[in-house]
Amino acid sequence: MLFLTGHFFHTIDAKSRVTIPAKLREVINTAEQGYGFVAVVSADGILCLYTPAAYHEIAPQFDPRSQTRAEVRDFRRLAYGLADQLEIDRLGRILIPEATAKRCGLKRDVAIVGVQDHIEVWPRDRWEEFLDARVPQQDELADRAMSREREGQKPSPPAEGTA
C-alpha cells in the first residue's frame, strides 16, 4: 500500500516535463505498483497521478450488462478515454500532455502533493490559495471527514427475522 506525503514546488519545463520529487518516487515499489503513472483529471480540475496498481484499485468497474445504459458508456469514455499513461524518464520526469495541462490550468509553477495513494499536480498559486483557505479549517475538516468515514463503515442492520 502506498503512503505518499508532502508537498514540493517545481516548474514545468519548456518541453512540458515536470520532475516527480525523489522523496515521492522512493516510496513507490515499481515491482508491486507498476512503472509510470496513470494521469486523470479530478472532478475539481486537479491532475492526479496513480501508479498502475493504485489506478486499478480505484478505477470504476461496471457489469458488462450495463453497457446498454448511455450514462455508463459516457462515464467510461470520460474515466478511461481521458486517462493518460505517462512514462517516467531516468531523471524522474513525466511529460504532461498539452490537453491535460490545459484542462488543469497548469502553466509553469506547480505544487506536487503526495496524497496517500496518489500524487496531485496543482498550479502553485491554486495550491497556496487552497492552503490559505483550508489550513485554518483543518480541525473542522478532520472532524467532518472522520464522521463521514465512520458513517460509511457502520454495519448494516440485521435483516428481518435474523438476529
Image (tube, grey):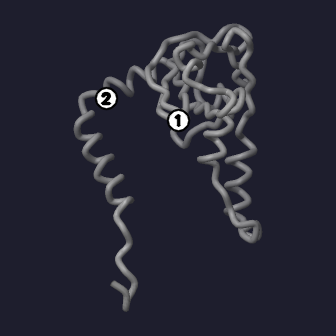
For disc 2, the marked residue is: 133
Label 2 – label 1 distance at C-alpha: 24 Å
- Quadrant assignment, res 90: top right
Residue 61 in percent (x, y) is at 66, 57
Density class for disc 1 (Cα within 10 Å; few <14, some 14-19, many ≥20) is: some
Nearer the camera: disc 2 or disc 1: 1
Type of amino acid at the residue the image marks with label 2? Ala
Density class for disc 2 (Cα within 10 Å; few <14, some 14-19, many ≥20) is: few
Q: Residue placed farthest to the bottom in the image?
A: 161
Rendered residue at 59%/30% (across/down): 104
Residue 93 in percent (x, y) is at 68, 14
Tell whether 27 sits left or right of 82. left
- Quadrant assignment, res 10: top right
In this rendered view, identify the residue nearer to me: 155 or 135: 155
In this rendering, is residue 21 above or below 147? above
For disc 1, the marked residue is: 117
